[in-house]
Image (cartoon, rainbow, N blue to C red):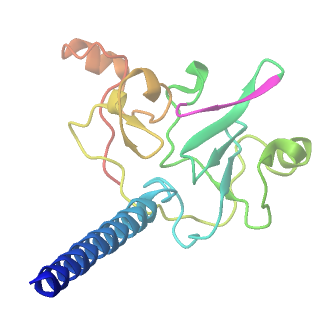
């Protein structure tokens, strides 16, 4: 009888070990799959970015003298004497239109401080610079779109969205319609 009990105990231990091993393997596979799925969307270019540049890290925006870090979805600009990273442009550019503004694609820069050569970029790509024609990845949001809901190519709260999209319409018209958010509606291309 003891041999039968010993055999049953060993079988039970082996079955338990197999179940635990399968559970760990399943958990590890699920966690690995989830990690891959999360990383696919991180660092995607914004809808206002130019078509054809999937492997770049930065754009330089000459009209606002700022950089856009694609992987982090952050604007980089000077605030006083310090370079800051923000999800929004400074208040003075709250009416800047990212869809129609020119983006200098920094294909040759790899690092964490694109502003390191800012003086050269500022001279080479002065405010108002327009290089070869660019087509945006996506279209400007259509009529009825509230600009206070846009920043860096995605939807978010008003505080983070100051300065991201310029209204093509007259803000006085919008005030007369009861829209007092200081913005208005963009127009389709």
Q: Is 83 in the magenta?
A: yes
Which residue ends up furthest to the front in the rendered image? 1
Percent coordinates x, y for residue 164 in the rendering: 48, 34
Residue interval drawn in magenta: 82-88
Residue 65: x and y, percent?
73, 37
Is residue 168 visible in this depiction of the protein?
Answer: no
Which quarter of the picture shows residue 108? bottom right
Q: Magenta residues: mostly which secondary structure? A: strand
The residue sitting at 23% across, 80% down in the picture is 10
Q: Quadrant of the N terminus?
A: bottom left
142 sits to left or right of 113: left
Q: Nearer the viewer, residue 4 or 129?
A: 4
Q: Is residue 170 left or right of residue 119?
A: left
Query: Which one is nearer the viewer's eye here, 115 or 125?
Result: 115
The vertical placement of 106 against 24, above or below, is above
Q: Residue at x 47, y 61 (%)?
A: 136
Expressed as whole percent of the image width and height from the top left, the position of residue 163 reads 50, 28
Q: Is residue 69 magenta?
A: no
- Determine whether 11 is above or below 174 in the image: below
Within the image, what quadrant is residue 54 found in?
bottom right
Q: Residue at x 45, y 26 (%)?
A: 160
- Which residue is situated farthest in the left direction here? 1
Residue at left offset 22%, top offset 72%: 16
Judge whether residue 102 can be spotted in this image. yes
36 lies left or right of 3: right
Image position of 76 with respect to 170: above or below:
below
Image quadrant in which the C terminus is located: bottom left
Up the image or down, 40 lies above or below 43; here it is: below
Residue 91 in the figure: left or right of residue 59: left
């Amino acid at each position: 009888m003891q041999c039968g009990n010993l055999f049953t105990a060993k079988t039970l231990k082996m079955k338990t070990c197999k179940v635990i091993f399968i559970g760990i393997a399943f958990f590890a596979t699920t966690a690995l799959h989830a990690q891959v799925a999360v990383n696919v969307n991180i660092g995607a270019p914004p809808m206002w970015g130019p078509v054809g540049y999937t492997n770049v890290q930065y754009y330089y925006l000459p009209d606002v003298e700022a950089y856009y870090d694609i992987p982090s979805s952050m604007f980089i600009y000077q605030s006083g004497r310090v370079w800051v990273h923000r999800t929004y442009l400074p208040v003075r550019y709250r009416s800047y239109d990212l869809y129609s503004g020119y983006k200098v694609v920094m294909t040759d820069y790899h690092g964490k401080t694109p502003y390191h050569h800012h003086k050269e970029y500022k001279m080479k790509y002065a405010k108002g610079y327009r290089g070869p024609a660019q087509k945006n990845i996506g279209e400007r949001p259509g009529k009825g779109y509230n600009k206070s809901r846009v920043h860096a190519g995605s939807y978010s709260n008003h505080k983070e969205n100051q300065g991201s999209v310029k209204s093509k319409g007259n803000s006085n018209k919008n005030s007369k319609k009861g829209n007092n958010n200081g913005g208005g509606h963009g127009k389709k291309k």
